[in-house]
Amino acid sequence: MSKSIFKNSLKLFITALVVIGFSVKGFCQSNPLCTIEIKNPSAIFRDHELVSFPYEKLLAKLSGSKAFKLIELQTETEIPFQLEYKGKKQPVNVLMQISCAPGARILVAVVSGNPAVVAPKTFARFVPERFDDFAWENDRVAFRMYGQALESRKDNAYGIDVWSKRTSDLIINKWYKSGDYHIDHGEGLDCYGVGLTLGAGDIAPYINDSIYFTNNFKSWKILDNGPLRSTFQLTYAIKNVANIPVAVTKTISLDAGSQLNRVEVTFNYSGNSELPVVIGIVKRNGKGKILFDEQQSIMGYWEPENPANGTTGVGCVFTQPVKGMTIAKGHILSSAKIHSQQPYVYYTGVAWNKANKITSSEKWFTYLSDFSNTVKHPLEINIR
């Protein structure tokens, strides 16, 4: 065979492989295992929002294969996803991160194959080397709560603490390892003072004009740990609340791309009576800006400016009507009443102006309002 004939044959062979490759790709997407339709019923752009649907519902469509990829049909790009276990042995939900315009819909093909590795965007861990902290973060914000090892110290603290970060990188392990996180070296810093308060949106019983702080957690459990959602559970020692023994469990989730945590709290006590509680944000000295919106069930705070460390916004979004909002006991408070063993769900989180995403009280309060609307009008999912 001459060299020219060989070269021409090689070119035809390579061209055929390319055509076959594209044909296989097109065939897989035009003949998927199933299709997922996502609709945005709201007037708000859903930016990198996590949507969830039951894993069992998808499994029934997979024809025995558990390896699958999610492909957005319009752009032909792979969508990152996470199997959510909620502490169980088998997956419970499939979580995928999508963006969707107001009133728009997205079609996603489920095809056979091994999915691309998803870079972690959330992380949570127990930190025994720092007096039993529990810390968690995503690609926007970071938080921590305190364990019982801290209770015997003079620097004890109760509520939700905030680490102000301006990087999308996960920094918890790096900052704890260095121990040098009270100075901003370009990634952010710990400048949020908690002390013996509710901090950035913690919850506690409120009886006879007194806050009964739940103090520090005694045990922890990680239910899921990324890459797109981290969920953990904290339990607290039984506490005497106005002569009523009360046990508390808090289950906290943080999604990639979100400023707010989902908090599910269960108070366990004897009897059928309602327990008054408050969700609170510690109030600073100086002129901050406060949002009380009982109609939308939103409470927001834009702290007084700190010339050295910038300004922190804290906010809560409630899934049930609140019973009043006020300033008392050094806090901005929202009141509610709950029953024993009935979970109470709300969202709480922060923004930091030096992260250059939310830089004013107006933008922060708008974010809280939009977030509230996304909770009320979730993305609609149809598997077919």
Image (cartoon, rainbow, N blue to C red):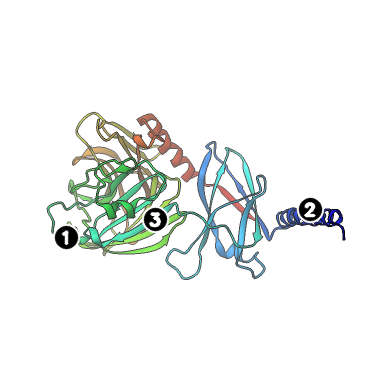
Residue at 41% from the left image edge and 56% from the top image edge: 230
Residue at 36% from the left image edge and 30% from the top image edge: 360
Residue at 41% from the left image edge and 35% from the top image edge: 357
Q: Position of residue 335 (x, y in %)?
A: 29, 45
Q: Position of residue 358 (x, y in %)?
A: 39, 34
- The residue lying toward the viewer, choosing from 53 and 124, is 124
Give whichever of discs 1 and 2 has the lower sequence position.
Answer: 2
Mark 3 or 2: in front is 2
Residue 230 visible here: yes
Q: Position of residue 231 (x, y in %)?
A: 40, 58
The answer to the question of whether label 1 and label 2 lie on touching residues, with beta carbons closer than 8 A, is no
Give whichever of discs 3 and 2 has the lower sequence position.
Answer: 2
Residue position marked by numbered label 1 in the rendering: 243
**What is the CA distance from the residue labelled 1 to the residue labelled 2?**
80 Å
Residue position marked by numbered label 2 in the rendering: 15
- The residue lying toward the viewer, choosing from 4 and 188, is 4
Mark 1 or 2: in front is 2
Above or below residue 188? Residue 128 is below
Residue at 44% from the left image edge and 57% from the top image edge: 226
Q: Secondary structure at mark 3?
A: strand
**What is the CA distance from the residue labelled 3 to the residue labelled 1?**
38 Å
Instruction: Name which residue type carries label 3.
Output: Phe
Residue position marked by numbered label 3 in the rendering: 123
Instruction: Return the residue found at the far front.
Output: 2
Residue 323 visible here: no
On the rendered image, what quadrant is the C terminus found in? bottom right
Q: Position of residue 14 (x, y in %)?
A: 77, 55
Relative placement, left or right, of 62 versus 190 is right
